[in-house]
């Protein structure tokens, strides 16, 4: 008997959720907590919002969103996974995959490039500096790629930085990071506060890992400024580490252009706060997938409509959708987010760039 992806997901997740419920009831007593603010004292700020105190953190060590409290409910996970997906028939009939432009090698030769590798992973070359965001290239125990990687990973050498937005397995993969760091022993990893203890065990001790609080600038030099920025999300790898590692996005700036990489985020005032603090981005890489059922997903993921709304509030120039089409994480068909965007151009004020895997997405690339 063939087991569907949805059924496999249920088979894997039901015992995990049950175990989590038992753990939360019997081994996680409630604590009184107070709100504090933290940062990496070794890093500086280029600009901060008015009255900025730092990254919010409770006295139990858990990080907090700026505007919305995080509410974890394993009961809601169980409710979603055991309920019938109203889009299941539509998903079965839709066998489309992402358009791909295969890359034999990566040789930028001084040319700025912005290349989508799938989901939230981009290969970016700016001012002679090469970086990769949220690399998850290999199947793991919870994820299977539905789109091919446009380039052989062995061709990705001379990478300067790996940017990791948060610890979820569709954004932070152990085997992928091991492969990149083995090919690029001089690479530096940039991430949020308290991510180093997780990642360090996956790499050699020679790999530098720098952690930042929100609105702090990483030590990357003047040719490329990289700032860690807020997101409305959460973090967890196991049963007892919820929100102990900081999540966020990245804002990249050169003298010529700026890029905002959202990471994972629900909708909120932080989008406008970022643009008011750091400027409106030339390119906004916005998550649009894994949004159904919306009653469950909207606190952590933007749907296409909310992503477009956030983009317009940020006054961005170019909208590039991501976080769809590669991994089956939710109820909607994999390419539905792109359908919604292309059929409703007003959502992004006609500034949508339809991404193709392996293609340079810059509208006016440097020669």
Image (cartoon, grey):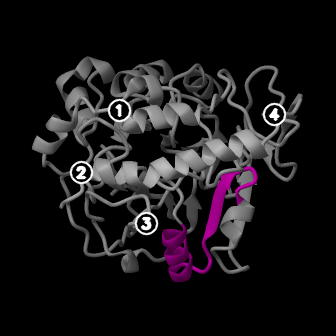
Front residue of 126/134: it is: 134
Q: Where is residue 366 in the image (x, y as percent from the top left)?
A: 36, 53
Give the left or right position of residue 62, taking residue 269 as reference: right
Check the image and report above or below for 341 versus 184: above
The local secondary structure at tag 4 comes to loop
Q: Which of marks 2 and 3 is in front?
A: 3
Near mark 2 (Cα within 10 A), the count class, few <14, some 14-19 or many ≥20, is some
Near mark 3 (Cα within 10 A), the count class, few <14, some 14-19 or many ≥20, is some
Q: Identify the magenta region.
A: 174-195
The local secondary structure at tag 1 comes to loop
The local secondary structure at tag 2 comes to loop
Distance between the alpha carbons at the discs numbered 3 and 4: 35 Å
Front residue of 159/39: it is: 39
Mark 3, residue position: 140
Q: Which of marks 1 and 4 is in front?
A: 1
Distance between the alpha carbons at the discs numbered 2 and 3: 24 Å
Q: Position of residue 213 (x, y in %)?
A: 74, 43
Instruction: Compare marks 1 and 2 and give the one earlier in the sequence.
Output: 1
Q: Nearer the viewer, mark 3 or mark 4?
A: 3
Asked if the magenta segment contains residue 199, the reply would be no
Instruction: Compare marks 3 and 4 and give the one earlier in the sequence.
Output: 4
Front residue of 350/176: it is: 176
Instruction: Compare marks 3 and 1 and give the one earlier in the sequence.
Output: 1
Tell me what residue is drawn at x 17 percent, y 24 percent: 343
């Amino acid at each position: 008997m063939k087991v569907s992806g949805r059924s496999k997901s249920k088979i894997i997740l039901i015992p995990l959720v049950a175990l989590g419920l038992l753990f939360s009831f019997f081994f996680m007593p409630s604590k009184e907590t107070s709100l504090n603010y933290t940062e990496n004292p070794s890093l500086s700020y280029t600009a901060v919002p008015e009255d900025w105190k730092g990254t919010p953190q409770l006295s139990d060590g858990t990080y907090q969103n700026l505007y919305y409290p995080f509410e974890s409910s394993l009961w809601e996970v169980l409710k979603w996974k055991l309920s019938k997906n109203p889009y299941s028939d539509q998903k079965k009939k839709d066998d489309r995959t992402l358009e791909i432009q295969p890359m034999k090698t990566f040789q930028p030769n001084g040319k700025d490039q912005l290349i989508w590798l799938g989901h939230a992973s981009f290969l970016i070359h700016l001012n002679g500096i090469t970086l990769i965001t949220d690399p998850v290239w290999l199947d793991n125990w919870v994820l299977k790629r539905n789109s091919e990687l446009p380039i052989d990973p062995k061709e990705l050498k001379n990478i300067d930085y790996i940017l990791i937005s948060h610890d979820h397995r569709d954004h932070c993969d152990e085997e992928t990071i091991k492969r990149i760091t083995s090919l690029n022993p001089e690479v530096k990893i940039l991430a949020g506060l308290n991510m180093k203890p997780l990642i360090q065990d996956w790499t050699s001790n020679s790999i530098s890992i720098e952690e930042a609080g929100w609105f702090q600038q990483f030590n990357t030099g003047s040719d490329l400024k990289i700032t860690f920025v807020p997101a409305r999300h959460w973090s967890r790898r196991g049963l007892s580490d919820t929100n102990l590692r900081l999540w966020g996005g990245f804002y990249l700036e050169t003298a010529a252009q700026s890029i905002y990489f959202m990471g994972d985020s629900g909708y909120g005032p932080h989008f406008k706060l970022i643009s008011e603090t750091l400027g409106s981005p030339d390119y906004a890489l916005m998550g649009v997938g894994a949004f159904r059922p919306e009653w469950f997903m909207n606190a952590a993921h933007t749907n296409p409509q909310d992503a477009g709304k956030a983009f317009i509030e940020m006054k961005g120039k170019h909208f590039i959708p991501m976080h769809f089409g590669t991994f089956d994480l939710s109820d909607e068909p994999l390419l539905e987010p792109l359908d919604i965007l292309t059929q409703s151009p007003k959502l992004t004020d006609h500034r949508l760039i339809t991404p193709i895997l392996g293609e340079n997405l810059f509208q006016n690339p440097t020669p």
